[in-house]
Image (cartoon, rainbow, N blue to C red):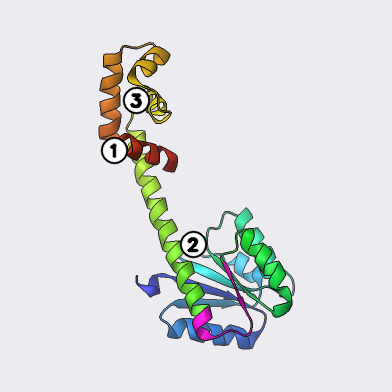
Amino acid sequence: MDKQHFCIYIIDDDKGMRDSLTWLVKSSGYDAVAFENAESFIENLPDNKLGCVIADIRMPGMSGLKLYQKLSEMDFQMPVIIITGHGDISIAVKALKDGIFDFVEKPFDDKVILDSISMAIHYCKNQQEQHSIQEMLRERFKTLTSREKEVMDKIVLGLSNKQIAASLNISIKTVEVHRSRVMDKMEADSLAALVRMSLKI
């Protein structure tokens, strides 16, 4: 995993914290961009969504949690790590349940924040791969005829060839032909594989 492909976005109103985190992240091989508030980050949202966001839970204006909610509304898919003070632990735990990737309590060791970043990057990489797989499966699905799509829908519901033939008012032989073409075009080697593909699409 080439760390330079991933950017860590640091959002903190405390200049000292911003600078030390930026140095730590860059010295670990990642790219880093810092913002003094959440509003300026939203105004300059990156096109490249490979990376993660580290935001302080308490900032003037938009807090780290409000930023996460705003990014979710905008469908900006990037893991968010919240930096929290001791008094905000209960809020951070609730945020974790609501979808925040992780929270790190101040004061923290360098290793703790770097481990959290590493996990977030790994998650981001997996999401990217899943997205690529979905795109590939959608392209395969587009090659199916309307009738083949209908047959595929019935197959993944677990219907037999006989049941599919009756529901679509076609012969069993025709269903078998369509079924074979669906499996070929989707490059599925089993019914289970086709069902998994259907769920991803």
Of pointers 3 and 1, the one earlier in the residue sequence: 3
State how far apart marks 2 and 3 are (Cα). Answer: 37 Å
| Rendering coords of residue 43 (x, y %) | 61, 65
Q: Is residue 104 magenta?
A: yes
What residue do we see at 42% from left, 15% from top? 167
Q: Nearer the viewer, residue 88 or 1?
A: 88
Identify the mark at residue 148; answer none if there is no mark: 3
Where on the picture, by quarter, is residue 55? bottom right
**Residue placed at 41% from the left, 25% from the top?**
154
Is label 3 or label 1 in front? 1
Question: Mark 2 is on which residue type?
Answer: Asp
Q: Which mark is residue 113?
A: none
Q: Which residues are magenta?
A: 102-112
In the picture shown, does residue 200 fall above or below 87? above
Q: Position of residue 176 (x, y in %)?
A: 27, 21
- Image quadrant for the C terminus? top left
Sequence order check, earlier mark of 2 and 3: 2
Q: Secondary structure at mark 2?
A: loop
Residue 1 part of the magenta segment: no
Q: Which residue is mark 2?
A: 47
What residue is disc 1 on? 188
Using the numbered discs, state the Cα–Cα distance from disc 3 to disc 1 in whole angstroms: 14 Å
Q: Is residue 190 left or right of residue 168?
A: left
Amino acid at dot 3: Glu
Vertical placement of residue 124 versus 188, above or below: below
The local secondary structure at tag 1 comes to loop
Report helix, strand or loop for mark 3: helix
Relative to 11, residue 78 above or below: above
- Residue 186 is situated, as x and y percent measured from the top left of the image, at 30, 36
Could you say which quadrant of the image residue 103 lies in?
bottom right
User: Looking at the rendering, which quadrant does residue 139 occupy?
Assistant: top left
Task: Report the Cα–Cα distance between label 2 and label 1.
Answer: 34 Å
